[in-house]
Protein backbone atom coordinates (compact mmCIF):
# COMPACT_ATOMS: atom_id res chain seq x y z
CA UNK A 1 0.00 0.00 0.00
CA UNK A 2 1.30 3.46 -0.93
CA UNK A 3 0.21 6.61 0.87
CA UNK A 4 0.52 10.02 -0.78
CA UNK A 5 -0.44 12.36 2.04
CA UNK A 6 -1.03 15.70 0.36
CA UNK A 7 -3.07 17.16 3.21
CA UNK A 8 -4.00 16.38 6.82
CA UNK A 9 -7.02 18.72 6.72
CA UNK A 10 -10.61 18.07 5.69
CA UNK A 11 -12.88 21.06 5.14
CA UNK A 12 -15.47 22.50 2.78
CA UNK A 13 -13.92 25.19 0.61
CA UNK A 14 -15.16 28.76 0.98
CA UNK A 15 -16.36 30.64 -2.09
CA UNK A 16 -13.01 32.41 -2.32
CA UNK A 17 -11.14 29.13 -2.01
CA UNK A 18 -13.33 27.51 -4.68
CA UNK A 19 -12.56 30.39 -7.01
CA UNK A 20 -8.87 29.93 -6.27
CA UNK A 21 -9.03 26.21 -7.06
CA UNK A 22 -10.87 26.80 -10.33
CA UNK A 23 -8.60 29.62 -11.49
CA UNK A 24 -5.52 27.74 -10.36
CA UNK A 25 -6.62 24.62 -12.23
CA UNK A 26 -7.29 26.56 -15.43
CA UNK A 27 -3.97 28.33 -15.12
CA UNK A 28 -2.01 25.14 -14.52
CA UNK A 29 -3.70 23.45 -17.47
CA UNK A 30 -2.89 26.40 -19.72
CA UNK A 31 0.75 26.50 -18.57
CA UNK A 32 1.39 22.81 -19.12
CA UNK A 33 -0.45 22.87 -22.44
CA UNK A 34 1.83 25.71 -23.56
CA UNK A 35 4.91 23.81 -22.38
CA UNK A 36 3.87 20.79 -24.45
CA UNK A 37 3.18 22.91 -27.52
CA UNK A 38 6.44 24.84 -27.24
CA UNK A 39 8.40 21.61 -26.88
CA UNK A 40 6.59 20.20 -29.91
CA UNK A 41 7.24 23.40 -31.91
CA UNK A 42 10.99 23.14 -31.36
CA UNK A 43 11.11 19.36 -31.88
CA UNK A 44 11.95 18.66 -28.23
CA UNK A 45 8.81 16.82 -27.19
CA UNK A 46 9.08 13.13 -26.37
CA UNK A 47 7.12 10.60 -24.35
CA UNK A 48 9.15 10.83 -21.10
CA UNK A 49 8.72 14.62 -21.08
CA UNK A 50 4.95 14.26 -21.61
CA UNK A 51 4.82 11.71 -18.78
CA UNK A 52 6.68 14.16 -16.53
CA UNK A 53 4.39 17.06 -17.41
CA UNK A 54 1.25 14.95 -16.90
CA UNK A 55 2.38 13.91 -13.42
CA UNK A 56 3.52 17.40 -12.43
CA UNK A 57 0.23 18.92 -13.63
CA UNK A 58 -1.76 16.23 -11.81
CA UNK A 59 0.15 16.59 -8.54
CA UNK A 60 -0.32 20.36 -8.63
CA UNK A 61 -4.08 20.02 -9.21
CA UNK A 62 -4.39 17.60 -6.31
CA UNK A 63 -2.39 19.89 -4.02
CA UNK A 64 -4.92 22.65 -4.72
CA UNK A 65 -7.64 20.48 -3.16
CA UNK A 66 -5.29 18.93 -0.56
CA UNK A 67 -6.16 15.38 -1.59
CA UNK A 68 -4.89 12.59 0.64
CA UNK A 69 -4.20 9.56 -1.58
CA UNK A 70 -3.71 5.91 -0.73
CA UNK A 71 -2.86 3.37 -3.46
CA UNK A 72 -3.60 -0.33 -2.93
CA UNK A 73 -3.15 -3.39 -5.10
CA UNK A 74 -0.50 -4.74 -7.46
CA UNK A 75 0.14 -2.72 -10.60
CA UNK A 76 1.04 -4.87 -13.65
CA UNK A 77 4.33 -4.48 -15.47
CA UNK A 78 3.22 -2.07 -18.18
CA UNK A 79 6.56 -2.53 -19.92
CA UNK A 80 6.19 -6.23 -20.68
CA UNK A 81 5.24 -5.69 -24.33
CA UNK A 82 1.52 -6.38 -24.00
CA UNK A 83 -1.22 -3.86 -24.78
CA UNK A 84 -2.91 -2.35 -21.71
CA UNK A 85 -6.07 -0.36 -21.09
CA UNK A 86 -6.96 0.93 -17.64
CA UNK A 87 -10.70 0.90 -17.00
CA UNK A 88 -11.39 3.26 -14.14
CA UNK A 89 -14.45 4.29 -12.18
CA UNK A 90 -15.54 7.83 -12.99
CA UNK A 91 -17.00 10.02 -10.26
CA UNK A 92 -15.02 13.24 -10.59
CA UNK A 93 -12.94 15.43 -12.88
CA UNK A 94 -10.06 14.42 -10.61
CA UNK A 95 -10.06 10.74 -11.66
CA UNK A 96 -7.51 11.51 -14.39
CA UNK A 97 -5.02 13.44 -12.20
CA UNK A 98 -5.34 10.78 -9.50
CA UNK A 99 -4.53 8.05 -12.04
CA UNK A 100 -1.51 9.92 -13.41
CA UNK A 101 -0.09 10.39 -9.92
CA UNK A 102 -0.90 6.89 -8.63
CA UNK A 103 0.09 4.67 -11.57
CA UNK A 104 3.32 4.23 -13.53
CA UNK A 105 3.85 4.12 -17.26
CA UNK A 106 2.97 6.37 -20.19
CA UNK A 107 -0.74 6.76 -19.46
CA UNK A 108 -2.91 8.59 -21.96
CA UNK A 109 -6.64 9.18 -21.59
CA UNK A 110 -8.96 7.91 -24.30
CA UNK A 111 -10.56 11.30 -24.82
CA UNK A 112 -13.88 12.52 -26.13
CA UNK A 113 -13.44 14.24 -29.47
CA UNK A 114 -15.01 17.43 -28.04
CA UNK A 115 -11.98 17.98 -25.80
CA UNK A 116 -9.75 18.44 -28.83
CA UNK A 117 -11.68 21.59 -29.77
CA UNK A 118 -10.70 23.37 -26.54
CA UNK A 119 -8.04 26.03 -27.28
CA UNK A 120 -4.51 25.10 -26.12
CA UNK A 121 -5.67 21.94 -24.37
CA UNK A 122 -6.89 20.24 -27.54
CA UNK A 123 -3.71 20.98 -29.49
CA UNK A 124 -1.55 19.92 -26.55
CA UNK A 125 -3.44 16.64 -26.20
CA UNK A 126 -2.87 15.82 -29.86
CA UNK A 127 0.84 16.61 -29.57
CA UNK A 128 1.05 14.50 -26.39
CA UNK A 129 -0.47 11.37 -28.04
CA UNK A 130 -3.90 11.45 -26.40
CA UNK A 131 -6.13 9.29 -28.64
CA UNK A 132 -9.78 9.56 -29.53
CA UNK A 133 -12.03 7.02 -31.23
CA UNK A 134 -14.95 8.44 -33.23
CA UNK A 135 -17.35 5.54 -33.80
CA UNK A 136 -19.96 7.78 -35.43
CA UNK A 137 -17.80 7.75 -38.58
CA UNK A 138 -16.82 4.25 -39.69
CA UNK A 139 -13.85 5.33 -41.81
CA UNK A 140 -12.57 7.55 -39.03
CA UNK A 141 -13.19 4.85 -36.41
CA UNK A 142 -11.10 2.30 -38.31
CA UNK A 143 -8.27 4.80 -38.57
CA UNK A 144 -8.58 5.79 -34.89
CA UNK A 145 -8.54 2.14 -33.78
CA UNK A 146 -5.46 1.41 -35.86
CA UNK A 147 -3.73 4.42 -34.34
CA UNK A 148 -4.74 3.41 -30.80
CA UNK A 149 -3.39 -0.09 -31.35
CA UNK A 150 -0.07 1.29 -32.64
CA UNK A 151 0.20 3.52 -29.60
CA UNK A 152 -0.50 0.64 -27.22
CA UNK A 153 2.04 -1.57 -28.98
CA UNK A 154 4.63 1.17 -28.59
CA UNK A 155 4.10 1.33 -24.82
CA UNK A 156 1.20 3.74 -24.31
CA UNK A 157 -1.22 2.65 -21.56
CA UNK A 158 -4.73 3.83 -22.41
CA UNK A 159 -7.06 5.12 -19.68
CA UNK A 160 -10.80 4.84 -20.21
CA UNK A 161 -13.97 5.30 -18.15
CA UNK A 162 -16.47 2.55 -19.04
CA UNK A 163 -19.30 4.49 -17.38
CA UNK A 164 -18.85 7.29 -19.89
CA UNK A 165 -20.03 9.99 -17.49
CA UNK A 166 -19.40 10.93 -13.87
CA UNK A 167 -21.27 9.21 -11.06
CA UNK A 168 -22.71 11.68 -8.54
CA UNK A 169 -22.37 9.36 -5.55
CA UNK A 170 -19.45 7.08 -6.39
CA UNK A 171 -21.66 4.10 -7.28
CA UNK A 172 -21.13 2.42 -10.64
CA UNK A 173 -23.31 3.64 -13.48
CA UNK A 174 -24.26 1.48 -16.50
CA UNK A 175 -21.32 0.78 -18.81
CA UNK A 176 -20.88 2.03 -22.36
CA UNK A 177 -19.53 -0.48 -24.87
CA UNK A 178 -16.96 1.72 -26.64
CA UNK A 179 -13.85 1.03 -24.56
CA UNK A 180 -14.70 -2.69 -24.41
CA UNK A 181 -14.85 -2.84 -28.21
CA UNK A 182 -11.44 -1.17 -28.22
CA UNK A 183 -10.05 -3.68 -25.72
CA UNK A 184 -11.28 -6.61 -27.85
CA UNK A 185 -10.16 -4.99 -31.11
CA UNK A 186 -6.64 -4.56 -29.71
CA UNK A 187 -6.63 -7.80 -27.66
CA UNK A 188 -5.59 -5.72 -24.67
CA UNK A 189 -5.12 -6.51 -21.01
CA UNK A 190 -7.79 -4.68 -19.00
CA UNK A 191 -6.65 -3.30 -15.63
CA UNK A 192 -9.63 -2.39 -13.42
CA UNK A 193 -9.05 0.61 -11.14
CA UNK A 194 -11.53 1.93 -8.60
CA UNK A 195 -11.12 5.35 -6.98
CA UNK A 196 -13.01 5.49 -3.69
CA UNK A 197 -13.99 8.82 -2.17
CA UNK A 198 -13.13 10.94 -5.20
CA UNK A 199 -16.78 11.99 -5.67
CA UNK A 200 -16.55 13.98 -2.44
CA UNK A 201 -13.74 16.20 -3.71
CA UNK A 202 -15.90 17.77 -6.42
CA UNK A 203 -19.35 16.15 -6.68
CA UNK A 204 -20.59 15.77 -10.25
CA UNK A 205 -22.49 18.73 -11.69
CA UNK A 206 -21.73 20.98 -8.68
CA UNK A 207 -19.12 23.58 -7.73
CA UNK A 208 -18.87 22.33 -4.15
CA UNK A 209 -15.22 21.60 -3.48
CA UNK A 210 -14.22 19.69 -0.34
CA UNK A 211 -10.61 19.98 0.73
CA UNK A 212 -8.41 17.34 2.34
CA UNK A 213 -10.56 14.39 1.31
CA UNK A 214 -9.18 10.83 1.69
CA UNK A 215 -9.01 9.16 -1.74
CA UNK A 216 -8.39 5.43 -1.99
CA UNK A 217 -7.07 4.11 -5.32
CA UNK A 218 -7.55 0.35 -5.69
CA UNK A 219 -5.90 -1.61 -8.52
CA UNK A 220 -7.56 -4.93 -9.35
CA UNK A 221 -6.45 -8.13 -11.03
CA UNK A 222 -5.91 -7.68 -14.79
CA UNK A 223 -8.16 -9.35 -17.35
CA UNK A 224 -6.42 -10.51 -20.54
CA UNK A 225 -8.70 -10.36 -23.59
CA UNK A 226 -6.29 -12.23 -25.86
CA UNK A 227 -8.29 -14.71 -27.94
CA UNK A 228 -11.64 -13.17 -27.04
CA UNK A 229 -14.01 -11.95 -29.77
CA UNK A 230 -17.07 -9.75 -30.10
CA UNK A 231 -19.15 -12.71 -28.95
CA UNK A 232 -17.42 -12.38 -25.57
CA UNK A 233 -18.27 -8.69 -25.18
CA UNK A 234 -21.06 -9.11 -22.63
CA UNK A 235 -19.01 -11.56 -20.60
CA UNK A 236 -16.00 -9.21 -20.50
CA UNK A 237 -18.21 -6.27 -19.49
CA UNK A 238 -19.81 -8.30 -16.72
CA UNK A 239 -16.43 -9.47 -15.43
CA UNK A 240 -14.98 -5.96 -15.34
CA UNK A 241 -18.10 -4.67 -13.60
CA UNK A 242 -17.84 -7.42 -11.00
CA UNK A 243 -14.19 -6.60 -10.33
CA UNK A 244 -14.81 -2.86 -10.05
CA UNK A 245 -17.76 -3.48 -7.75
CA UNK A 246 -15.53 -5.61 -5.55
CA UNK A 247 -12.82 -2.95 -5.49
CA UNK A 248 -15.29 -0.23 -4.54
CA UNK A 249 -16.73 -2.39 -1.79
CA UNK A 250 -19.86 -1.73 0.21
CA UNK A 251 -20.54 1.73 1.49
CA UNK A 252 -18.64 3.70 -1.16
CA UNK A 253 -21.26 6.44 -1.12
CA UNK A 254 -21.49 6.64 2.68
Image (cartoon, rainbow, N blue to C red):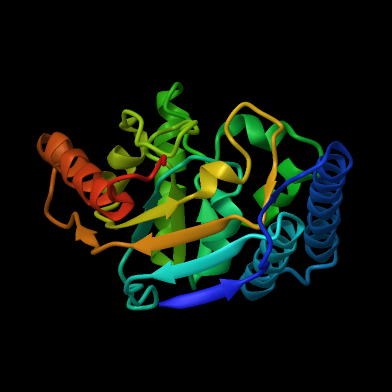
Q: Is residue 151 visible?
A: no
Q: Residue furthest top?
A: 136
Q: Quadrant of the N terminus?
A: bottom left
* Residue 198 left/right relative to 146: right
Quadrant containing the C terminus is top left
Residue nearest the viewer, comparing 216 with 241? 216
Residue 87 position in % (x across, y down): 37, 50
Q: Nearer the viewer, residue 10 or 157?
A: 10
Q: Position of residue 149 (x, y in %)?
A: 39, 54
Seen from the viewer's position, the closer of residues 141 and 196 is: 196
Q: Is residue 135 left or right of residue 48?
A: left
Q: Residue at x 81, y 47 (%)?
A: 21
Q: How many marks?
A: 0
Residue 60 position by quadrant: bottom right
On screen, 30 above or below 9? above
The answer to whether residue 28 shows anywhere in this view is: yes
Position in image of residue 81 (x %, y %): 33, 74
x and y percentages locating residue 6 in the rendered image: 66, 69
* Looking at the image, residue 140 lies above or below residue 155: above
Q: Is residue 79 left or right of residue 34?
A: left
Residue at 29%, 55% in the rendered image = 247
Q: Identify whether 98 is placed above or below 145.
A: below
Amino acid sequence: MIRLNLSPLTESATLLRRAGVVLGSVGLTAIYSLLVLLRALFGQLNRPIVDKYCREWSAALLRLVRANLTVRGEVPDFGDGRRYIIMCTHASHYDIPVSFVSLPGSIRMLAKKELFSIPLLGQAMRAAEFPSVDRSNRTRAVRDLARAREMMESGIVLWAAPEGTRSPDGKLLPFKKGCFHLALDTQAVIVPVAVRGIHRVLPARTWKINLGQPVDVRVGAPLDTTGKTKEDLDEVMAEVRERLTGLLGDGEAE
